Each structure stands twice: as structure tokens, then as C-alpha cells.
Image: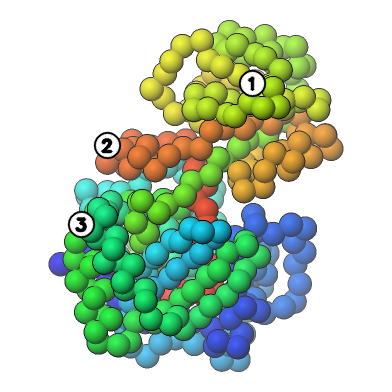
Amino acid sequence: MSLIKPFSGIRPKKKYAKKITSPNISYIDNYKPSKKLNFLNLLNTSNINKSKKILLSLRKKGIVQQDQSNHFYLYRITYGKKKLLGIVGKINLNNYDDEKILGHEETFVERIKKRKEQLIKFNSQISPIYTTYKIDQTSLKKLKNIFKSKSDYNLKSKDNCTHELWVVRKENLEKLVKNYIKNINKIYICDGHHRIQAMLKSKKKIAPMIIAFPDKQVNILDYNRVVRTSLKFEEIKKIISQNFFINILNKNNKLKQSQIEMYHNKKWYLLKPFKKSKELDVTILRKLILNKILKNKKHIDFVSGFKGKKVLENLIDTKKYNLAFKLYPTNISQVLSFAKNKKYMPQKSTWFHPKPLDGLISSRIIS
């Protein structure tokens, strides 16, 4: 039996799709809440009842509608010359962590609570959980053939990507999809661990909506840290120098795996560890630096590599934080290895880019 099942998705009417859908808030600069009926405002207000009203209004006004029958959905994201080919369906939570559906990342307790409240209150999953699976070149060719027809939706979004969605209605296309997904025997959670944990802890019969991308197409960016610490910089350097060489960063330097870049007082530094380690760069940063210079875990924030160095510099130069750490991206083989061995990376170890839009395809979580 296939791990991925069809379902009756909730989609916007085509004429409203661009107005109401949105990329992740991290892709948007200077976001300000408004009264507009869209998924950006729905997901980015602290008032969950207000969010629920927006969602109900979208449904009552017929801006979004649920399909009358079960379908698979195809989703293609084009960024630059690259493409991500995704299949959207539902999975059974009973298969989670049983060698068929595997996670790889630690979670935050408070964030799980928030996601749980949101999911139950909305009775909706606004966007699919990002997953991957292993694939060979022969199967990849078959997958590309599935995406040859004209899409139902085609949107250029604020994340500088083109997003396309197909509803698999035609019998011949449905047959191609079913035959293809029969060979997907293991799914790895990439982005969405907090939502998965929230669903598990809800103790309700929930089938998560996922999007499955082939591992050969998955792109991971660095996920960086900015911190506030009461220690003076000389004290910080003294702590770091116990395990790292510290040098002023050469402008031509390209960050390599196992190296860390640090920014303070308008200067970038390169941190090279004394010893080689099999641990992840993000784990080394946490163990050998952050745990030693931070008394309060709340004094840390996470910044996607999509934003670039300038954003890190600005956060430090404006004194909002006093140190930034830039990491080499975790790679997909590390993600799969951790999941397979039931090990867990620190929170915010990976930033998967690009991601599906919020609101282009959503689903009810409790029938």
C-alpha cells in the first residue's frame, strides 16, 4: 500500500489565488498586519480568534472552497534554473517513527503548544508539511513526465519563485501518480516537525497533509544565529579560543564545512576548530560556544540564510543583538542519516528553500 493518500483539498478560486496566498513570513520585509483577507494576516497575528475569523470569512465568501472528491495534487516550484517537483497527499500518523515516516530535528515545547492550539482551533492545515524521499535517476525521469500538462495555478510570489499547482483529475494522470508513489517506501520530514508533534499530542485522529519532494532536488540554506549576551567581547573571544582559531575574515574567504563565521562591532571573524569532529556544525556551535556564553536560552534568535549577511550585520549594528554566527548549510545526506538512525539535530538546523505557499492548498485535519 502507498504511504501517500489522496484527499479533498481546500483551494482558492483562481482569481483570488495571488491575493490571498503567501510565502513564509521570513521572505517578507517589514510585514505589517492589516485587515485584508489573506493567509499572511491569518498566520501572523497573536490573536488566534481573529485568525479563525479570517479563515471563516475566506470560506463563507467562497474565496476558498473544498474539493468535493479526493485527489492527489502536484506542486512545482521554479527558482532560477532549478525546479522542485512535489506530490501533495496525506499520510497516516501511525506510521510516524516506525521506519516509514521519520523526523530529524528537536522541537521547542512552547511552539508545539502554539501549533496544537492553532491546528485544533482552525481545524485546518494551511500548508503541507515539507518532506523528502530517496530517488534514482530513472524514477526522476518518470516524475518529470507527470508534470507535462498545463497547471491549474501559476503564481509568481514574493519569495521570487514561481509556484504551480495541479489538481489530479484525469484518470491517466492519476494512474501515473499512483504507480509512481507505490515506490516511495520511506518519507523523511524536513520542515514541519512542530506541526507533526502538535498533531501527535492532540490525541485526535489526524492525517497530516504533506508535500513530498525528491531528495536530489531538495535545497538547504544555512540557518544562522544572533544572540544577546552580557559578556564583554574579550571574554567571549577567550572562551571561543579554547576550541577555535580566531582570525579576521578575509573578504575572499568562502565558508567551508566545520568553519563558523562570527560578526561583532562591524567585523567578521573566521572560527576554525582545533580538532576535526563528526558532529554537525550547528551542534559544535551550541556545545562549544553558545552554551558557554548564554545564560538565558531566550536570548537567541534564528535567521534564514535566504536573508544574506547584510541582515545579520544590521541586527548587530543596531544593537538589537551583539553577536551573529553564520554557519555552513547542513546537507540533505546528513538529514537523511540522522532520521534513519533516529537521531535528532538541534532546533533550527536546516532552512529548506524554497517552500510551498501558505494557502494555495490546505486541508481539514478532523473530518
Relative placement, left or right, of 314 versus 246 is right
> The disc labelled 2 sits on which kind of residue?
Asn
Q: CA distance from mark 3 to mark 2?
A: 16 Å
The quarter in which the N terminus is drawn is: bottom left
Residue at disc 3, secondary structure: loop
Q: Earlier in the sequence, mark 3 or mark 2?
A: 3
Relative placement, left or right, of 362 versus 68 is right
Relative placement, left or right, of 340 versus 27 is left
Q: Residue at x 74, y 41 (%)?
A: 310
Q: Earlier in the sequence, mark 1 or mark 3?
A: 3
Q: Nearer the viewer, residue 10 or 46?
A: 10
- Which of the 4 quarters of the picture holds residue 239? top right
* Foreground: disc 2 or disc 1: 1
Query: In the rendered structure, are the residues bearing label 2 and label 1 in contact, judged by CB atoms less than 8 Å apart?
Result: no
Residue 65, given in percent of the width and then of the height, sits at 49, 87
- Residue labelled with disc 2: 341
- Residue labelled with disc 1: 270
Looking at the image, the residue that sits furthest to the left is 1
Q: Is residue 148 above or below residue 273?
A: below
